[in-house]
Image: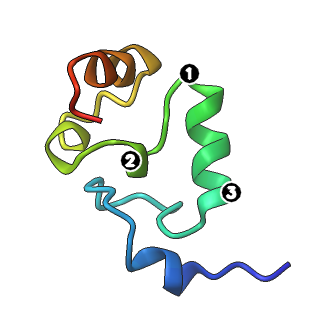
Amino acid sequence: MDCKKEQHLESCNCSYEPCARKGVCCECLSYHLNSRELPACCFPNDAERTYDRSFEHFARLVTGGSV
């Protein structure tokens, strides 16, 4: 299966500029799940910019109706 990095970059909202995984969703997801986190694309832009990608942060956003 070919990676569609350029296509994924169009919708990637990751604000961490030196990230080598931008647009390579399989690597991004694997990296974050290994750290008990979700990737940037699971968060609204304002929440993503906090760099708190934890499951707990995501749960608070869901409970608060932000996601």
Which residue is the site of mark 3? 26
Which residue is the site of mark 1? 36
Q: Position of residue 41 (x, y in %)?
A: 40, 52
Q: Amino acid at mark 3?
A: Cys
Q: Quadrant of residue 51?
A: top left
Q: CA distance from mark 3 to mark 1?
A: 15 Å
| Residue at disc 1, secondary structure | loop
Instruction: Tell me the residue at 43%/76% (across/down).
Output: 9
Q: Is residue 10 left or right of residue 33?
A: left
Q: Which quadrant does the N terminus fall into? A: bottom right
Closer-to-camera residue (19/45):
45
Q: Position of residue 47 (x, y in %)?
A: 20, 37
Q: Residue furthest front?
A: 65
Q: Amino acid at mark 1?
A: Arg
Which residue is the site of mark 2? 40
Q: Amino acid at mark 2?
A: Ala
